[in-house]
Image (cartoon, rainbow, N blue to C red):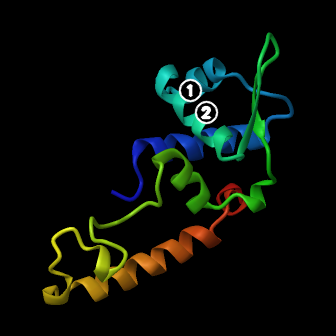
Amino acid sequence: MLITRASEYAILSLIVLSKAESPVDSESLSNQLSIPKSFLAKILQALAKKEILKSYKGVNGGFILLKESKNISMLDIMSAVEGKAPAVFDCASSADDCPSEMAHLCSIWPFLNKLQGKIDLFLAELTLADILN
């Protein structure tokens, strides 16, 4: 599946954080977006690990965007929270990586691979700033 709940919640959180002037804590985000706090905390940590967010600890701690919204692609966001690039199909990215070792017999693999490439390019070019506008 291309857009999971984790990706959706990451994008929603980044929209809120892009408008914040100071760090926002995960509990406030959780309440504002009606996202389970423990699930959101994992998403925010994944975004911080990939240097999309910066986290601050302490009483006034929370999260802020580390990059400008125009420099954060949807592909970056989705890859960060999913742990891998988003895929529309379970098909391998190359015929040599086909788990069934039957790629040479598969008549739809070239089509699926081309479609995935177009989706990857679209997600790489679509930024958080585009979503905000």
Q: Label 1: how many residues lie within 10 Å, few (<14), some (14-19) or many (20+)?
A: some
Q: Position of residue 39 (x, y in %)?
A: 47, 27
Q: Is 62 located above or below residue 89 in the figure?
A: above
For the N terminus, the image quarter is bottom left
Q: Which amino acid type is shown beneath numbered disc 2?
A: Gln
Q: Which residue is denoted by mark 1 in the rendering? A: 41
Q: Is 55 located above or below residue 52 in the figure?
A: above
Q: Label 2: how many residues lie within 10 Å, few (<14), some (14-19) or many (20+)?
A: some
Residue name at image x 80 percent, y 35 percent? 20
Q: Which residue is denoted by mark 2 in the rendering? A: 45
**SS type, badge 1:** helix
Q: Position of residue 99 (x, y in %)?
A: 21, 68
Residue name at image x 42 percent, y 54 percent? 3
Q: Which amino acid type is shown beneath numbered disc 1?
A: Ala
CA gap between label 2 and label 1 equals 6 Å
Q: Position of residue 57 (x, y in %)?
A: 77, 18
**For residue 38, side relative to residue 104 (left or right):** right
Residue name at image x 13 percent, y 88 percent? 105
